[in-house]
Image (cartoon, coloured by chain):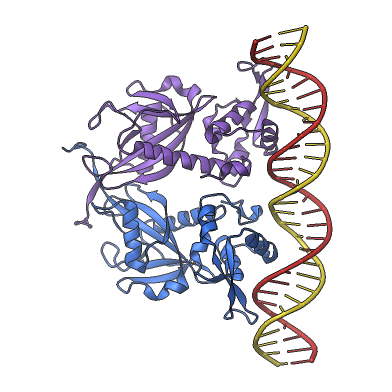
Chain colours: A purple, B blue, C yellow, D red
Amino acid sequence: MKFYKNEPLILLAVDCIIFGFNGESLQILLIKRGFEPEINHWSLMGGFVQPEESPEEAATRILKKLTGLENLYMEQSSIFGKPDREKYQRVVSITYFALIDTNQYQHILSDEYKAKWFPIDNYPELIFDHEEMIVSAKRLLRSKAAVYPILFELLPEKFTLPQISSLYEAVYTIDIDKRNFNRKLLSSKLLIKLNEKDKENSKKGAFYYTLNRDVYKERIMSFLRYLPSWSIQEQ
Amino acid sequence: MKFYKNEPLILLAVDCIIFGFNGESLQILLIKRGFEPEINHWSLMGGFVQPEESPEEAATRILKKLTGLENLYMEQSSIFGKPDREKYQRVVSITYFALIDTNQYQHILSDEYKAKWFPIDNYPELIFDHEEMIVSAKRLLRSKAAVYPILFELLPEKFTLPQISSLYEAVYTIDIDKRNFNRKLLSSKLLIKLNEKDKENSKKGAFYYTLNRDVYKERIMSFLRYLPSWSIQEQ
DNA sequence: AACTTTTGAATCAAAATAACGATAAAGCTG
DNA sequence: CAGCTTTATCGTTATTTTGATTCAAAAGTT
């Protein structure tokens, strides 16, 4: 038995804003579209929600198709659904943003798609309203990360204190006083110090740390401040 | 020219979680469904996204139809889209939550719908996954309100300090030390004291305040803490 | 080698937090 | 009037957090 016979059917898409961190700057993963319309233009990776999957599952599927990765940190960020947002026909798009470590996963980017990392503040012109999607996801990333420790998802399994601070500096484009920042970080009990040093980036070497996953899981759902309050005024 | 010819079309709905505050407890507005399927069962107010409107516009339209009100505080909260979430056919639903003051608007609730306010922790069984929608919206309300001053949307134009604290007590089910809470509140410059007292709820009477809209608009987008941090651990 | 920059550890003062105590005014009730 | 509740204000204290600073060792640069 079917109801809602007079209600309109709509194309429902998901688009993924994939943030990455290469140790220096915040990046975003874009592809050259392989199908019409707007073939060969830069865009976010996206696709349509299929009958047997939820929008979230669709986003997971698309992320996996592009990066080969599952279990990424992913979050629904916004919905773009103005009737005329795509020139040719009506498509409502749900956006998801994901966080990954670019170095670790550079090599497994799917060859099937012409994907490329771009700096968050310098990427080519995008189709439709995809730039707006990025801007909105970036705003969400910032406000989330000011309260929840989600940025650790952008780091490798083992990371150093200088890496964390440059990640925060990249996301918020601020300068951080490492002395205070490191103290705050260590006092959070979120990090476990390893007996190993990263000698690649400096001669002295910086100790590696890993996330204390137990504490992290507790805190990921609770409120924390990782930034001095003066830096999170402009949202 | 149409593309995406092989992609599936989907029914896209919006459902509204309408929170209200009557001066004592947090409420939620439910309706008795007037159409099949599940006619005469309690549910959230919802509807389908029409060809000429965005999902957000659809939510606004639906809110207005039910409450007569425009310009409500409204925010997209979640998406429910498992293929089998409605028994009969596939519908993806976007939920929006809205905040209103129940006392002020009780009378203009549309007669067309059998709408009724229920306490947030005691409402009838709902159709499909609507209860899950409420739970998720309530969680979002809590975490938003801990950081942004959105709860003022639940209060009348003129409100008293005791009303604010009981609102926070209701939303978080905690006891608040009014001495510290009022001090914090007044120091925020968010309130303007009026020369008028509410004598209904006490013999002495409590002074009315209004929102300083200028400061509010600034702060609504920035970070503030309105609760002692011990109370926002469990999100 | 001489210089600048970056850090980690320690310290300090100011501010914010949370808990608690006390008081008083307003208006009601008995 | 005395006693009660509600509202509001003021003050105190201990603790924690914050942001700034000093200092010396270690890197990096020229």
Number of labels in the image equals 0
B233 sits to left or right of A70: right
* Image quadrant in which the N terminus of chain B is located: top left
Q: Nearer the viewer, residue B186 or C2?
A: C2
Q: Nearer the viewer, residue A148 or B89?
A: A148
Q: Nearer the viewer, residue B29 or A38?
A: A38
B67 sits to left or right of A22: left
B44 above or below B143? below
Residue at the far left in the pictured view? B1
Q: Percent x, y for residue A46?
A: 33, 35
Residue at 34% in and 30% down: A125
Residue A113 in sight in this render:
yes
Q: Percent x, y for residue C13?
A: 80, 44
Give residue A202's quadrant in the image: top right
Q: Percent x, y for residue D19?
A: 69, 40
Residue at 63% in and 35% down: A212
B233 sits to left or right of B62: right
Give residue A147's quadrant in the image: top right
Residue B32 in sight in this render:
no
Q: Percent x, y for residue B130?
A: 39, 58
Q: Nearer the viewer, residue D7 or A121?
A: A121
